[in-house]
Amino acid sequence: MLSRIDATWEEVALAEQVAFETVADEAEARKQVQALLTAYLSAAPSDDPLPAAVETRLTAPLVDPLSGANLGVPLLGIVDLVLEERTGPLIVGFKRPARAGPVSGRAFACRCRDRS
């Protein structure tokens, strides 16, 4: 796992637009990530199931439950963790912005379209 961090570090930093002020700052950040991963893996039970998905963005059409008609509004969600179970995928958590308040259907649709 640590070798994967080294192999993908530059690619991920570029994709996430992470800019380090100095080479020393980057080296320190890499050491911290490796230390955190090592601590996590040493504390995790060996029989923990492997995740099927982590921090995954999912979309699905909003469908009228009575008519089955697609209402033309995409549902968007970010799933924290998905585990494979014998009965199918198990969704472990959902993300929702803490500052989000009630949103009208029309406003929600606009937000979803803006992010697509």
Image (spheres, rainbow, N blue to C red):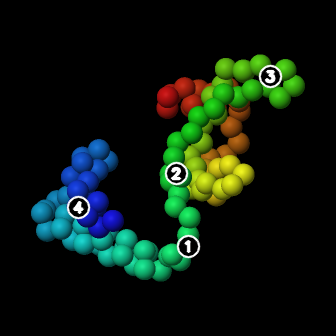
User: Label 3 near label 4: C-beta < 8 Å?
Assistant: no
Of labels 1 and 4, the one closer to you = 1
| Quadrant in the picture for residue 37 | bottom left
Q: Secondary structure at mark 1?
A: loop
Within 10 angstroms of label 1, few (less than 14), some, or many (20 or more) residues?
Answer: few
Q: What residue does disc 1 label?
A: 47
- Tell me the CA gap for discs 1 and 3: 41 Å
Q: Residue 1 or 31: which is nearer the viewer?
A: 1
Q: What is the C-alpha distance between the residues marked 4 and 2?
A: 22 Å
Q: Secondary structure at mark 4?
A: helix
First along the sequence among labels 4 and 3: 4
Q: Give the residue at the far left of this rendering.
A: 23
Q: Which residue is mark 3?
A: 68
Q: Amino acid at mark 4?
A: Asp
Residue matched to label 4: 6
Q: Residue 20's spot in the image, x, y percent?
A: 20, 58
Q: Position of residue 65 (x, y in %)?
A: 83, 29
Mark 2 — residue? Answer: 53
Gap in angstroms between the C-alphas marked 2 and 3: 28 Å
Label pair 4/2, CB-CB below 8 angstroms: no
Q: Marks 1 and 3: which is nearer the front?
A: 1
Look at 59% across and 26% down and name the residue there: 110
**Dot 2 amino acid type:** Ala
Q: Up-down: is 12 above or below 77?
A: below
